[in-house]
Amino acid sequence: MEVTSQPAAFEPTDFHTGLMSCCEDTSVCCYGCFCLPCLGCSIASEMNECCLCGLGMPIRSVYRTKYNIPGSLCNDFWAGYFCMPCAACQLKRDIDIRKRTGEF
């Protein structure tokens, strides 16, 4: 018997909050605005990745792939390029929500 596809670990879903939804968690928003490198290291640490990978397209792409979130490398690049703090905060909010729901 040949296996042609494997079931995804997670059903396709979107990020729990929008890219510009900073007011949904003001503590994460302040963290991203005032200490973005620290937030990046926190995200990377939670994902068991290198701290240098904590911001931008690579970490966002890894996260999207793991949780079956639709998107593309191009969209990940532009989100980080045009608003790195917003993209990092969105990722951190999503991690926090998934931790509360037991998905992370």
Image (spheres, rainbow, N blue to C red):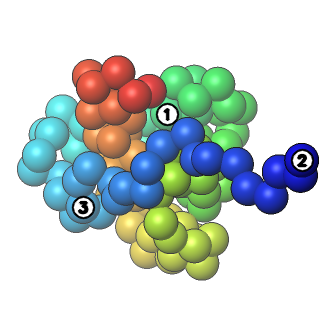
Q: Secondary structure at mark 1?
A: helix
Q: Position of residue 49 (x, y in %)?
A: 68, 31
Q: What residue is shown at x 83% (from left), y 51% (from top)?
A: 3
Q: Residues within 10 Å of mark 2 (few under 14, many from 20)?
A: few
Q: Secondary structure at mark 3?
A: loop
102 and 54: which one is in front? 102
Q: What residue is shown at x 89% (from left), y 47% (from top)?
A: 1
Residue labelled with disc 3: 18
Q: Position of residue 2 (x, y in %)?
A: 89, 52
84 and 10: which one is in front? 10
Residue 70 vertical placement versus 78 (above, below)? above
Q: Secondary structure at mark 2?
A: loop
Residue labelled with disc 1: 43
Q: Earlier in the sequence, mark 2 or mark 1?
A: 2
Q: CA distance from mark 3 to mark 1?
A: 17 Å
Q: Is 8 placed left or right of 101 in the picture?
A: right
Residue 17 visible? The answer is: yes
55 and 38: which one is in front? 55
* Image-quadrant location for residue 66: top right
Q: Position of residue 83 (x, y in %)?
A: 39, 67
Q: Residues within 10 Å of mark 3 (few under 14, many from 20)?
A: some
The quarter of the rendered structure image containing the C terminus is: top left
Residue labelled with disc 2: 1
Amino acid type indicated by mark 3: Gly
78 and 18: which one is in front? 18
Amino acid type indicated by mark 1: Ile
Q: Is 5 placed left or right of 11 in the picture?
A: right
